[in-house]
Image (cartoon, rainbow, N blue to C red):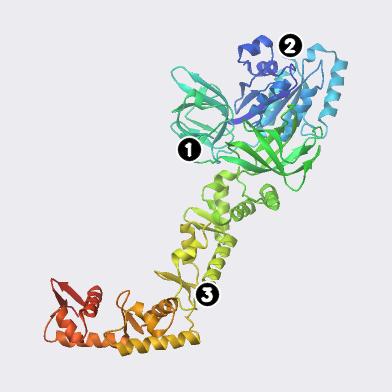
Amino acid sequence: MKHVILGTAGHIDHGKSTLVKALTGIDPDRLKEEKARGITIDLGFADLRYEDLIVGFVDVPGHERLIKNMLAGAGGIDIVLFTIAADEGVMPQSREHLAICHLLGIREGIIAITKSDLVDEELLEVVIEETKDFVKGTFLDNAAILPVSAKDGTNIETLRQTIHDISMGIKPKSSKGLFRLPIDRVFTLKGFGTVVTGTAISGTVSIDDHVELLPAGLKAKVRGLQSHNEFVQRAVAGQRLAVNLQGIDREDAVRGDVLAIAGTFGTTRRMDAYVELLKTSVEIKNRAQVHLHIGTSEIVSRLIIYGKEKLLPGDSGYCQLRFGEPLVAMRGDRFILRRLSPLDTIGGGVVADPFPPKKTNVSSLEVYLTGTLEEKLSEKIKNSGIEGLPAGIPGSWGKEDLPEVEHALRILKSRGVIVEIGDTVFHCDVVKGLSDGIVRTVSQYHKKFPLKPGVSREELKSSFKAVDSKTFFEVLSAIGELSVEKDFIRLKSFKPLLTSVDEKIREKVLQLLKDSGFQPPFKEELPNKLEIKPAQLNDLLKLLTRDGAIIRINDSIYLSKAAYDAMMDLLKKFAESKKEITVAEFRDLLGTSRKYALPYLEYMDGKKITMRVGDLRKILS
C-alpha cells in the first residue's frame, strides 16, 4: 500500500475543510472553537483510501494570524490541494500560501475552484482565467484546475480520481533512511498515556522500538502505533502516525519536537543554508532576527549573510541561521522565514549544513547542495578537520538513504579519500597534514636537541593539543619515516650529531670514567671535574649509555664499559668456587667501598645476574 500526504492551502473561508469532508467523509475540524467559528484554527487530519493507495490529508488554516499553524503541517506534504473560492477569486493568503508551497519545494498540486455552485458560468470562467494568471510560472502552472462544489458534488469524484492519478506518480518517501517524525500534536488518552502525532518523513518505526524525543533527549519506548485510525505493528515514511509513548509525560512533549530512534540524531544551534527572499519581501539586513519555521518547529533566529550586508527582495544567497535553542535538522530540509513584526513571510530556503564548522567555506555549501553524494561526504569530512566526524554522523547529516551513504563511504575509503580511525572518519588530506606536522615537529626537535635520542611521546603530543590521543597515536604509528619506540619518537634517518665541543667533552667523560675504575665520581661531581654545565652532561651521558660506551648503574653512578666488563669477569671467576657472595666479599673483590659495592649488586639484582637471599647474593650467571 502506497502512502502519500496531501495538504490543503488557500485563503481563509475558501472551503478547504468542507472540501476535505466531501472527499473523505471526515470532518478535519476537531476543535469546538473551529466548529463554532466555521474556520480551521489548528491542523486537521483525514484520509482518503483507494485499493492501492492511502492519501493522508493535512488541512491547514488559511487566516493570516494562523499561518504558523499552517507551516507546522506543511513540511511533509507531497501534493497540495490549492483552493480558490469562485465567489472571491485570488486573495492575499492565496498568494502567501503559494509562496510557502514553492519555498517548501512542493512540486505537485491540484487547483480546486471551490463554491462553484455560487456563481454563474461566466464568472467562473473569469476566476479560472485569473487563477491561470496567478499560478503562471509556478509549480502549479500546468496543474489541473477543477471547479468543484462540496454542496452539490460537482466534480468531487473527478477530483478523487485526479488525486489518485497524481499520487501514483509521487516518489515514495524512503523507509531506508533514519526514522524522523516532526510532532504536530500531543495529547493523552485514558488508559494509554501520551500520544504524539505527525507525518513520518523518513525511515521506519515499530512497536517496542526505543525512541528519543528531541531536542530534550528524553528516552521512551513505542507502546502503540496507529496510522489512519488503524493499529499497526510497523509504520513507514509517508504515513500519518499516532505514536503512544511509554516513559514520556504529556508535558514533556510539544509541537516542534522530533521523535527519532534513540541515538540516531544530534541537535544543532546553527546551520548553514541557501536562502531565497520573495519578491514581495522587504530587504533583510545582515544579523537581522527572523522567525524560522522548519519541520513543525518555530524558533527565533539570527540571519548571518555571507558576503553581503543585506538581501534585497528577490535576492538569494548563502547564510547562517543561529538560534538560542537546539533543534533537529538535516541537509536538504526546507524551511520558511518570516519577519518578527509584522508576521509576513519573507522567504525560505534549504539546509546546506546542519553542523557547520566554526569557519564556513561558502564554496563547500555549493558542493553540499549540488555535488554527488561522494563529493558531499568528502567535502564535509574534509571540513571537519582534525576533529573528524563520528562514523554515524554522515548518515544523519543528509537525507539520503543509509545504504546509499554507506556505499558512498566505502567508495571513498577504497579510493583512499577518507580514513577511518576507531569510530571516527577523517579526510586523507587532513591525515596527511597531521602526519607532515608530526614529522616536521620531530625534525625540529632533533635540530634543537641533537644529542637527545628523540622526543618523548607526551612532549610530542603536547604540540598537537587539538587532536585526541587515540587519533594522534594511530596516525603516529603509521608514519613510515618515524621510529616509534617505548620512550621516544625519532626520525629513522636521525643520528645524534656531536659538535666539536661535545666531542671533546665526550672524550673527557670516557677518560675520567676509565681512569676511575670501580670508583667513578658521582654524577653530581662530574660537571665540576669536567668544567661543564649539568645540562651539557645529561644529554651526553644518555647518548653514551645508549651507544653502550658507559653503563648506567643508577641515577648517580656511571661505569666505563671496560670497568663493567672487568667487574663481570671477577664475579664469574669468584662463582667458579662459590655460588654465593656477601656485600663485604664483593667489596673486597673489587677493592672498593660499600657505597659502590651495594649499588653494583642492586644493579645486578635487577638484571638477574644475582639474586638477593637474606644478606647473601646468589650468583645466577
Observer-side mark, 3 or 2, equals: 3
**How far across and down, in percent of the image, does residue 332 sit?**
65, 41
Residue 266 appears at what percent x and percent y?
54, 41
Quadrant for the C terminus in the image: bottom left
> Does residue 483 show up?
no
Q: CA distance from mark 3 to mark 1?
A: 52 Å
Q: For mark 2, does the 10 Å Cα neighbourhood hold few (<14), some (14 to 19), or many (20 or more) residues?
A: few
Mark sitting earlier along the chain (3/2): 2
Point out the frontmost of discs 1 and 2.
Answer: 1
Image coordinates for residue 50, horizontal then vertical, percent:
61, 24
Q: Quadrant of residue 489?
A: bottom left
Residue 397 visible in rendering:
yes
491 left or right, relative to 297? left
Q: Vertically, is 415 above or below 259?
A: below
Q: Amino acid at mark 1?
A: Ala
Q: Is residue 495 above or below residue 426?
A: below
Describe the element under mark 2 as helix, strand or loop. loop
Q: Mark 1 highlights which residue?
A: 262
Which residue corresponds to mark 2?
A: 152
Above or below: residue 486 compared with residue 35: below
Give the mark nearer the N terminus: 3 vs 1.
1
Q: Secondary structure at mark 3?
A: helix
* Residue nearest the viewer, comparing 181 with 151: 181
Residue type at mark 3? Lys
Image disc number at residue 617: none
Label 1: how many residues lie within 10 Å, few (<14), some (14-19) or many (20+)?
some
* Cβ atoms at labels 3 and 1 below 8 Å apart: no
Kindly identify which residue carries mark 3: 448
Contact between labelled residues 2 and 3, with CB atoms less than 8 Å apart: no
Q: How far separated are the C-alphas under marks 1 and 2?
A: 50 Å
Callout 3 environment at 10 Å: few (<14), some (14 to 19), or many (20+)? Answer: few
